Image: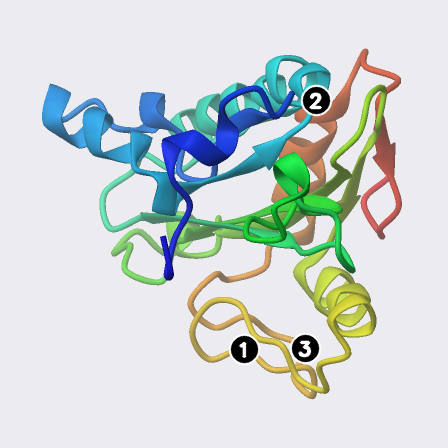
Amino acid sequence: MESQALDADYKGSGYDRGHLNPSFYHSENNLARLVTNSLTNVAPQVGDFNKGIWVKLEKSLYDAMNHSCNFAGAKRYFITGVVPSSGTTINNKGRVNVPDYFWTAMCCDSSGANDPLKNMMGWSAAFFDGNAINSSIRVYTIEDFLYYLSKLLSSSNPKLFADFNNTETEIRNCLFNQTQASTMVNGIIQNNDRFENRSIFN
């Protein structure tokens, strides 16, 4: 109780146990899926958001990675997190914060591919959404997202993925192919007016 949430915190709270690391991303065995239900891997999530646009995004990202990042030497990375609220908690107990936002950053690292053409097929993007009913997902380049995240978290230099910082234009472990990124992002957000393209993707 002193270090993490309990089942009792969520009971009657009106919030879902929102997975950070989705269970269906783990097809290797049932135990791998089961352990994602740990309360250290969830955060309070509005039901409409959790069961609606966010799960649709999770499935779209999973499919996009399987489609575009399954060649020899490629590595897939997902990093998911939240932006805590200034004081909203479940059950008014003051112990478990209800995040204002959920986000996911993804990277197809193609630097290990031997094929020269595949070696330049890496791409990355970030997806960000408010933890609320009828919220819309915003799409960013990693650079744009880190700049925005630094403002929300009052952090001077947040980092995602190896070898990246705000003074560089390249994500070395997630080789940034603008054409590939634009193609994949547009495929993810097409035909859904709850995805907002607020980056250089167009």
**Looking at the picture, how far across and down is residue 39, in whole percent?**
36, 39
Classify 10 as above or below 199: above
Q: SS at mark 3?
A: loop
Q: Are marks 1 and 2 in contact (CB under 8 Å)?
A: no
Q: How is the image coloured?
A: rainbow
> Which quarter of the figure has residue 31?
top left
Q: Which residue is mark 2?
A: 49
Number of numbered discs present?
Answer: 3
Instruction: Name which residue type carries label 3.
Output: Thr
Left or right? Give the position of 73 relative to 123: left
Instruction: Name which residue type carries label 2.
Output: Phe
Q: SS at mark 1?
A: loop
Visible residue check, residue 108: yes
Q: SS at mark 2?
A: helix
- The label on residue 169 is 3
Classify 12 as above or below 100: above
Q: Which residue is mark 1?
A: 164
Q: Are marks 3 and 1 in contact (CB under 8 Å)?
A: no
